[in-house]
Image: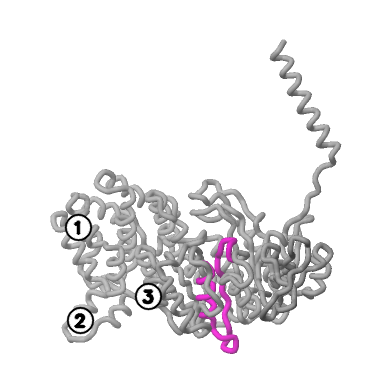
Amino acid sequence: MNHQSLSAFIWSVADLLRGDYKQSDYGKIILPFTVLRRLDCVLESTKAAVLAEHEEKRKLGLNADPFLLRKAKQSFYNISPLDMKKLMGDQDHIKENLFSYIQGFSEAVRDIFERFEFYAQIDKLAKSGLLYQVTEKFVNVDLHPGKVSNSQMGLVFEELIRKFAEISNETAGEHFTPREVIRLMVNLLFIEDDQVLAKAGVVRTIYDPTAGTGGMLSVAGEYLEEHNPEARLTMFGQELNPESYAICKADMLIKGQDVANIVFGNTFSEDGHPHKKFDYMLSNPPFGVEWKKVEKEVRKEYEQQGFNGRFGAGLPRVSDGSLLFLMHLISKMRPANDGGSRFGIVLNGSPLFTGGAGSGESEIRRYVLENDLVEAIIGLPTDMFYNTGISTYVWILSNRKLAHRKGTVQLIDASGFWQKMRKSLGSKRKELSDDHITEITRLFGQFIEASEGKKPISRIFKNSDFGYRTITVERPLKDENGKIIPGEKGKLKGKPQPDTSLRDTENVPLNEDVETYFKREVLPHAPDAWIDHDKTKVGYEIPFNRHFYVFEPPRELAAIDADLKQCTDRILTMIKGLTA
């Protein structure tokens, strides 16, 4: 069963709910039942052994927990004599038996169903007379890992969440990232470490502060499993949406990860992994979302802790928290002398250029570029994400750059790397093929400049190429006769006073001498101008598209005139026809 037909089957449960439930509430039933059935199938083969072990240890008065986990061969178990098939044998007591069955799970699983508020939903289904029929639907679908792999199961969850989000007009993209984008990011993350990761018994950590349903962590785990089954990736994450958190936790449980590493809550106001550092990190934070709710905590950390906290470099405007996630990830980097870190984050276009010199955004860009943390920025095609058609960019940052990358940033324009999807999913109309992912990974891995015809697709810049000084150009205040009015006190005494109405600013590239620029660009037009050096600010911006723009000269005037003449002749002929 592929994930589409599987989710279509599960979707058929919605037919039972129609009428008794609002469409936007379908997910509250279907998602937890899908998780329950998956866990039920996973434990099926060890059920008898677990029950026998539990009974034996109970008689001996021992803590059975470690023994039961060993028997279940999972990081969870269930000590109820019931399973979902047995529930079908007693229609009259289905509600009580279902409660009892869920209570039989180990603590981490019970927490998952509490996040779903599943008990309230079971109660409501029972009152509607639908509980038995809905349970029966799920008993008839086999979600055993032998039939449905972990990665397929992840896709099923994503498909269902996307459908529920569309129905209730929520932003589906808050929950997950297209798999091919994650595969690209994971490739870029691991490419230089293939030799290290190929060693037997290697253990690395990976972290996602906006874990959603755990898709990014899962794909990273699959990559390593494929390249080196001996290696182990320990996964850490945090998620704010209770349903996404519950699914992520269920997914990690089945994969044998320690679910205590997946924390619920807001990454900014309650960092779930304080003082922890990671080898790799991935994140797709929500685009352009304001951080007003956590502004008090963030500002307090910024003002009181500075660079000892997460946000020392500066704070972006409250309307867009994207760069806060970037700084949060930087704070989680393992020190370079301890092996260092690399991370990938998906951002929209605004973090590249929003905010002038001295603004929070510019100061954050200044910090990452002056500290040589940015390895590459890859521009993706539009229409790649489920909830938005805007341009998106993958930033790759590292504090352990190889020697040939030091002091540089690679920009890759992959906006033309796409194929049309057979069927659109929300705003997602385009996808990256395997060949596209391979080509982008090659350009990054080989660290080369490249073009397609006249159009560049990969360019390498010095970090300082993105910096500039904003200089303030003053002109003297003059009376009505055009005579300069000197200042009468302070440091302007006897000197020309600036005319604020004529004040202007110029951005001078960091790599150019300010005085040389001023003589060339300003003095020929305003010989009486001067620079107020006290007002000079350093700024950084990354005008991504400008670096890939190729000028197309307009057509010859004669050709345009010929087209216009042809057009006007045709209109005149039509008018003649109307008046005839």
Q: Which residue is mark 3?
A: 259
Q: Earlier in the sequence, mark 2 or mark 3?
A: 2
Residue at horizontal 58 percent and vertical 66 percent from the top = 351
**Separation (CA) of disc 2 from disc 3:** 27 Å
Magenta stretch contains residue 346: yes
The magenta-colored residue range is 322-351
Q: Which mark is residue 298?
A: none
Amino acid residing under circle 3: Val
Q: How is the image coloured?
A: one colour
Tell me if residue 499 comes above or below residue 550 in the rendering.
below
**Outermost residue, bottom direction?**
337
Q: Secondary structure at mark 3?
A: helix
Foreground residue among 223 and 149 = 223
Q: Which mark is residue 56?
A: 2
Amino acid residing under circle 2: Glu
Going by the image, does 104 lie left or right of 431? left
Q: Secondary structure at mark 1?
A: helix
Amino acid residing under circle 1: Asp
Q: Which residue is mark 1?
A: 123
